[in-house]
Amino acid sequence: MDPLSDATTGLLPHLLQLRTLLNRGQLYEQAVQDAGLALDRPAMTILVLLNAAEHPLRVGEIATRMQVVGPHVTRHLNSLEKRAIIKRVTDPEDQRARLIALTPSGRRIVDRYTTIVNGWFAAALAQWPDHDRAELIRLLTRLTSDLSTQFDAVAAGGTPPESED
């Protein structure tokens, strides 16, 4: 058997368990309750994505990152805009297009929510050495990037590229 295959055989069950842990409805509700917020999960996902982005995003980019269709995102954006949590700004590269950005209020909401969630991660990793925590972040970033490339190729009907490492 291929050594790489041996190394990845146990990966999927752990990833599925992690997904289940992170998507537990009660945990999301607990985080927004602890943060004193009243937002549904898709709206918070949009805010977290915007906060993590290095610049305002187009609606299509938000939809792609959420793996949903544009109209789903637009409905949430309209509600968030009415609440002054996000704002539409002119795209500097195309004056006709609009980008989505957090307002100061939106940034405060995300900060409250992520403080709660990051606290849970910090507690779970408290006994880990600094180098292990740094390595976890490095490897998760790499895995996410490589899986995105693989899955995008598969979704486009092509053959996934071979890993360079």
Image: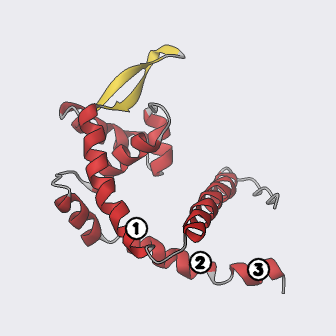
The span from disc 3 to disc 2 (Cα, nearest Å) is 12 Å
Q: Quarter of the image containing the C terminus?
A: bottom right
Q: Which mark is residue 12?
A: 2
State if disc 1 and disc 2 touch (CB < 8 Å): no
Q: Is 141 left, or right, of 103 in this rendering? A: right
Lower sequence index among marks 3 and 2: 3
Label 3 neighbour load within 10 Å: few <14, some 14-19, many 20+: few
Q: Are marks 1 and 3 in contact (CB under 8 Å)?
A: no
* Rendered image: mark on residue 122: 1
Mark nearest the camera among 2 and 1 is 1
Q: Which mark is residue 5?
A: 3
Q: SS of the residue at dot 3?
A: helix
Position of residue 51 relative to residue 33, above or below, is above
Residue at the spot 21% in from the left edge and 51% down from the top edge: 39
Task: Report helix, strand or loop for mark 2.
Answer: helix
* Mark 1, other Cα within 10 Å: few <14 / some 14–19 / many ≥20: few
Q: Residues within 10 Å of mark 2 (few under 14, many from 20)?
A: few
Q: Position of residue 21 (x, y in %)?
A: 39, 74
**What percent of the width, then of the height, locates residue 27?**
28, 69
Foreground residue, 136 or 85? 136
